[in-house]
Amino acid sequence: MIKPQRMCIVCRKSIDKDKLFRMVENEGNYIFDEKQTMQSRGIYVCESLNCLEKLSKHKKYKVLMKDLAEIASRAKKRENKLMNSLKMMKNSKTMTFGMELVQENIAKVNLIILAKDCNKKNTDKILSICKERNIRYIITASKKELGEVFSKEEINVLGVMDKKSAQGLLD
Ligand SMILES: [Zn+2]
């Protein structure tokens, strides 16, 4: 099953459309199209607060402030929820960390969690592996924040190998 992808207008990472926020043109402004179904030209932005902030200052795309605030709060909520779940599983031995180990153990990986500030090269690489092997993924938090959960300095990518834990994180 191939999911449609779109590009974040700010960081230019190509990500599953349903993981991005869509905005459409409306009387000279861009407004949040929550269900991604409005019949108008749309742009997409990822969940990164950095991208949302840059979009708020964009010269070409004027997004209504209240809509941007709504998107930012949704992004933050999703992130907090996931980080709390990760904290609860931090002692489980079913995780693998970093570009090399994740790729090495890829056959056992059921879910990939990618830091939102992971560079474009590694992001593209991981996402193409996910696509090829049909592995689900979540893009969330910063490398530093993910690192903190597991008492490491930084984590750019982690793989969840246990099926149950993967499902728990996706719910
Ligand atoms: Zn972005």
Image (tube, grey):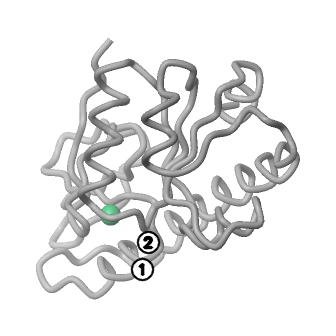
Residue 109 lies in what quarter of the image? top right
Q: Is residue 88 above or below residue 153?
A: above
Question: Which quarter of the frame holds ligand 1?
Answer: bottom left
Given residues 20 and 167, the one toward you in this image is 167
Side of 124 relative to 99 (left or right): left
Reading the image, the residue beneath label 2 is 68
Given residues 142 and 171, the one toward you in this image is 142
Residue depicted at x 39% and y 19%:
134
Residue depicted at x 30% and y 36%:
37
Q: Position of residue 34 (x, y in %)?
A: 43, 47
Residue 13 lies in what quarter of the image? bottom left
Residue depicted at x 47% and y 27%:
106
Q: Position of residue 54 (x, y in %)?
A: 31, 82
Given residues 64 and 82, the one toward you in this image is 82
SS at badge 1: helix
Q: CA distance from mark 1 to mark 2?
A: 5 Å
Q: Is residue 104 above or below residue 124?
A: above
| Mark number, residue 65 | 1
Mark 1–mark 2 contact, CB under 8 Å? Answer: yes
